[in-house]
Amino acid sequence: MNFINNIVKKLFAPLVAIIICFSVITDVSALEADITGNINPAGTDITGILNPAGTAISDLNTANGQAVIPSSDYDDEVFFTEPEQVFEEDKEAEAEDSVKVYPKWQGSRKKPTKDYDYYIKVNKTTCTVTIYIKEENGKLTPYKAMVCSIGREGHETPEGKGYKTSDYYDWRLMVDNTYGRYAVRFNKSIMFHSVPYYKTKKNSLEWQDYNKLGKPASLGCIRLAVADAKWIFDNCKRGTEVEVYSGNASTDPLGTPEPIKLDTKSSFRDWDPTDLTKENPWLVPVE
């Protein structure tokens, strides 16, 4: 009998040990899977979760206390005015001209067929901005005209030649605590930018001043419809020359576009009609 018991013990002891080891390994694997699943439920590389764009972490740092936003359009970084505020990504419907448009918009939406060097002239007398193509031989060819507002009495826009565009901002806090979109600096505190907004929201337009396009109305900057401000922002590279002068209608080779007048009783008045953001209620399909 003892002989049989010894044989049973020798046969089953290793089997029991194997079963116990297998059980422990299974429990550990389950725990590991559970921990991994909680940290990274998608099962993707943790590096991808921490840094989905694949950008070097050093590139995501701040400079001078301001968030650095890489820009593909310009050599350097673009800085937002208030780094603590996260702005919603632009949802501009930069799509085809056949998609949507404000029916009364007379501005040109055509894009350059190649990268030009531009020269910008601002005629204070007629409140007109004229964009010129700067040819290789130095000749200036009129390309596009925009209606604007210049500095009102007591805040006159300074005149002069040799100014150059420098800083570019999606949103820029103004001295009166309003915000300008697509602001482009060219003379110290003087910039091209949209008609002001009360907030950094596209449906907070200072509509009373929108109807002043074509007249002096600003604190010195050059105000434009959003589409025109964005055109300069997108197409006139840093270092583009700017000239501000007082001429007459004959010095505006393309004339002065007729400004849009908002219906002040409209529920849409808080939107710039030329803004191609898809939520803009002014936009209608082009037939």
Image (cartoon, rainbow, N blue to C red):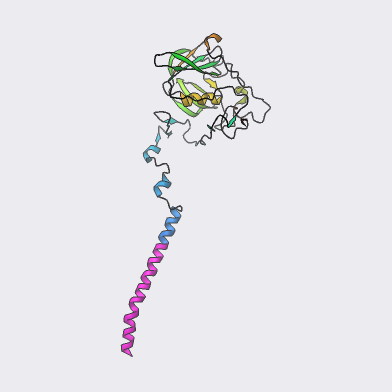
Residue at 35% from the left image edge and 74% from the top image edge = 17
In which image quadrant can residue 262 be found?
A: top right
* Residue 202 image position (x, y, % from top left): 57, 32
Q: Which residues are magenta?
A: 1-30
Foreground pick, 261 / 69:
261
Quadrant of the drawing holding the C terminus: top right
Is 116 positioned to the left or the right of 220 in the image? Answer: left
Single out the residue that lies furthest toward the front. 287
Instruction: Please tell me whether the stretch drawn in magenta is mainly helix, strand or loop.
Output: helix
Q: Say above or below: 9 vs 126.
A: below
Q: Looking at this view, is 250 or 286 the one in front?
A: 286
Residue 58 visible in rendering: yes
Q: Position of residue 246 (x, y in %)?
A: 52, 10
| Whole-percent x, y for residue 182 in the image | 50, 27
Going by the image, does 96 lie left or right of 18?
right
Residue 125 highlighted magenta (yes or no): no
What residue occupies the far right of the structure in this picture?
265
In which quarter of the view is residue 203 placed?
Answer: top right
Residue 175, visible in the rendered structure: no
Asked whether, in this view, residue 285 is left or right of residue 27, the answer is right
Residue at horizontal 39 percent and vertical 63 percent from the top: 28
Residue that appears at 39% across and 47% down: 47
Rendering quarter of residue 276: top right
Is 13 a magenta residue? yes
